[in-house]
Image: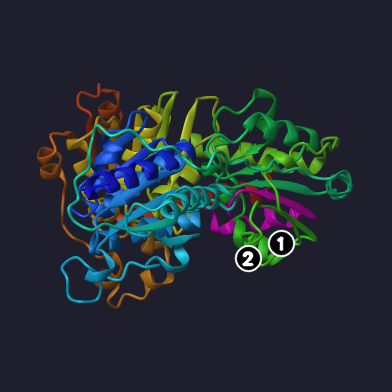
């Protein structure tokens, strides 16, 4: 068997093993050393293959695909620093529990550490930011290597898709020549099937949890970011049986498609409510149960850490359950859906009504909010009101996600909200949005700040290779707006150069470079009219100019209106 045939069988076997483990999508960053696998992926029916020439953007694009689809996505690059550029997105995937299958092509062993070009130490290069890492052997006509490929790929996919889900790394060396035989059939696999276990709670455990919830007099549910495909109907049935208020983080996607009978239970203004000292004193809980990650809102975190409820239950599939506040008293290591099967029947209490009435008061004020010149909140509010059903919203970190939390109201529309909150970074957001849109095939809107957009302008390159349907709303406040809310904003010394970081850049020329539809907006009225216009190109960029100082004042004035009303007990 010649070298070309051996190499072909090697990469065909890898491809078949990945597909047997339910991989359907591959993102490729072009390069020489990864040629055999790139050819194998591109010539295999049943695989969706995407190209992105910028590795950092490619990794975030794959992240978006995996985040939105809920399925593992393969990410392939050549050797050297190409693999280094994957690291930021891999870190995000690790903390956000997203199943990326990272394959880095490598030089053969004889070219490592001898000064060969594009040869760096790639063994376990992602450290603790991947759940599993393996260095593959070189291709050779050896049945032991065939068994190795079949089983290690199955193991890698099992690790990536087992809670807590996350990225895995396969380092695959190739020796030249790198061409394969496109007409050769896939070799027969030696590994047959994976079986995934189904979580369940024994009767005794279910009874203990039911008792904890049933005996509580003042309890609420926290819903953090939930995975795509989460059973919303089961959740609302559980909440309705408890008759507890549900503090819905926007990334829980429980603010959308809310059942009519559960509208009152959906608390979407908790961030503002928990800024009122009078309200906080009234609603001190004895029991809290949290599904998903810790929410965005800082006031909720500070409140829980201060009052430390007697019972705080975290439902988390991982043994390393998330508890950055150190307040969790009970950890249920299972899926959210499993806990929602527990039967608890409680009458509605005055405690729930306290939350409902306060939330309605805050909603009334927010609905009338008209903003001021330079304010970002009114633009976010206007955008959310214009979003059509059966569309998706992607939020950047820093101010955009906080405006989503403040201004995205509960609705019966079918809108899904996404953001990279595994590490809360501002990088790779544009690429993530394109990946989400590619996976879900729905009109998608991205709300992003100017610095975050600058960080991932290369993400736009993907539009040269694939179809897209993305509207990008850039909030250009000429710098880092979130820092204006922190104590250092009042210090004065060096604030602008260290935190404000104004660039003076605008993005009309970037839109022109990528043939995107573009509009520059300065007022809410202009913005509303622009949103009413038809989208004429695959990518639309709406640049909204705001003022950081005016934005801070407007937000604080809104929150003060709400807290004043609550403090007056209206």
**Residue 384: x, y in percent?**
42, 33
Whether pointer 2 and pointer 1 mark residues with C-beta atoms closer than 8 Å, the reply is: yes
The residue to which callout 1 is attached is 328
Circle number at residue 292: none
- For image coordinates 21% across by 51% down, the residue present is 54
User: Magenta segment range?
Assistant: 275-299
Q: Residue 280: in sight, yes or no? A: yes
The residue to which callout 2 is attached is 325
Q: Nearer the viewer, residue 392 or 45?
A: 45
Considering only vertical position in the picture, is 276 above or below 541?
below
Q: CA distance from mark 2 to mark 1?
A: 8 Å
Q: Is residue 171 left or right of residue 189?
A: left
| Residue 264, picture quadrant | top right
Q: Is residue 280 left or right of residue 427?
A: right
Considering only vertical position in the picture, is 159 above or below 496?
above
**Residue 532: x, y in percent?**
29, 23
- For image coordinates 56% across by 39% down, the residue present is 193
**Residue 247: x, y in percent?**
64, 45
Quadrant where the image shows the C terminus: top right
**Circle 1 residues within 10 Å: few <14, some 14–19, many ≥20:** many
Considering only vertical position in the picture, is 444 above or below 322?
above
Is 298 colored magenta in this rendering? yes
- For image coordinates 89% across by 48% down, the residue present is 204
């Amino acid at each position: 068997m010649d070298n070309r045939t051996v190499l072909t069988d090697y990469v065909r076997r890898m491809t078949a093993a990945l597909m047997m483990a339910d991989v359907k999508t591959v993102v490729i960053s072009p390069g020489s050393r990864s040629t055999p696998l790139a050819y194998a992926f591109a010539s295999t029916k049943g695989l969706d293959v995407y190209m992105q020439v910028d590795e950092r953007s490619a990794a975030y694009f794959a992240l978006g695909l995996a985040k939105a689809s809920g399925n593992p996505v393969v990410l392939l690059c050549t050797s050297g620093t190409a693999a280094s550029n994957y690291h930021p997105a891999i870190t995000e995937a690790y903390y956000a529990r997203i199943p990326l299958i990272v394959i880095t092509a490598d030089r053969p062993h004889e070219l490592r550490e001898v000064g060969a070009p594009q040869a760096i130490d790639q063994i376990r290069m992602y450290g603790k930011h991947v759940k599993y890492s393996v260095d593959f052997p070189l291709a050779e006509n050896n049945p032991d290597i065939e068994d190795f490929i079949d089983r290690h790929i199955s193991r890698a996919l099992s690790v990536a898709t087992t809670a807590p889900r996350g990225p895995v790394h396969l380092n695959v060396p190739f020796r030249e020549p790198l061409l394969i035989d496109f007409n050769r059939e896939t070799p027969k696999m030696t590994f047959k099937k994976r079986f995934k276990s189904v979580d369940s709670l024994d009767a005794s455990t279910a009874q203990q949890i039911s008792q904890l919830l049933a005996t509580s007099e003042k309890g609420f549910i926290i819903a953090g970011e939930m995975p795509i495909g989460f059973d919303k109907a089961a959740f609302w049935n559980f909440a309705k049986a408890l008759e507890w208020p549900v503090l819905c983080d926007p990334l829980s996607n429980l603010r959308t498609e809310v059942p009519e009978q559960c509208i009152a239970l959906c608390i979407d203004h908790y961030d503002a409510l928990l800024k009122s000292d009078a309200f906080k004193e009234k609603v001190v809980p004895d029991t809290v149960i949290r599904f998903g990650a810790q929410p965005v809102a800082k006031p909720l975190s500070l409140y829980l850490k201060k009052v430390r409820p007697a019972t705080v239950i975290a439902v988390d599939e991982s043994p390393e359950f998330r508890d950055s506040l150190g307040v969790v008293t009970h950890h249920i290591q299972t899926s959210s859906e499993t806990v929602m099967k527990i039967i608890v029947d409680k009458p509605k209490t005055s405690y729930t009504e306290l939350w409902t009435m306060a939330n309605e008061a805050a909603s009334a004020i927010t609905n009338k909010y008209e903003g001021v010149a330079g304010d970002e909140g009114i633009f976010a509010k206007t955008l959310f009101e214009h979003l059509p059903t059966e569309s998706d919203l992607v939020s950047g970190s820093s101010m955009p996600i906080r405006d989503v939390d403040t201004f995205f109201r509960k609705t019966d529309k079918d809108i899904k909200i996404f953001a990279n909150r595994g590490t809360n970074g501002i990088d790779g957001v544009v690429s993530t949005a394109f990946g989400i849109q590619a996976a879900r095939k729905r009109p998608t809107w991205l709300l992003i700040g100017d610095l975050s957009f600058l960080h991932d302008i290369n993400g736009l390159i993907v539009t040269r290779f694939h179809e897209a349907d993305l509207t990008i709303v850039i909030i250009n406040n000429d710098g880092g707006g979130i820092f204006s809310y922190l104590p250092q904003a009042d210090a004065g010394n060096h604030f602008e150069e260290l935190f404000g970081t104004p660039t003076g850049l605008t993005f009309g020329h970037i839109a022109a470079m990528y043939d995107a539809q573009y509009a520059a907006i300065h007022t809410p009225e202009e913005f509303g009219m622009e949103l009413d216009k038809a989208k004429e190109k695959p990518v639309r960029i709406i640049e909204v100019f705001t003022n950081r100082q005016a934005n801070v004042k407007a937000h604080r004035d809104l929150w003060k209106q709400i807290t004043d009303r609550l403090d007056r007990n209206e």
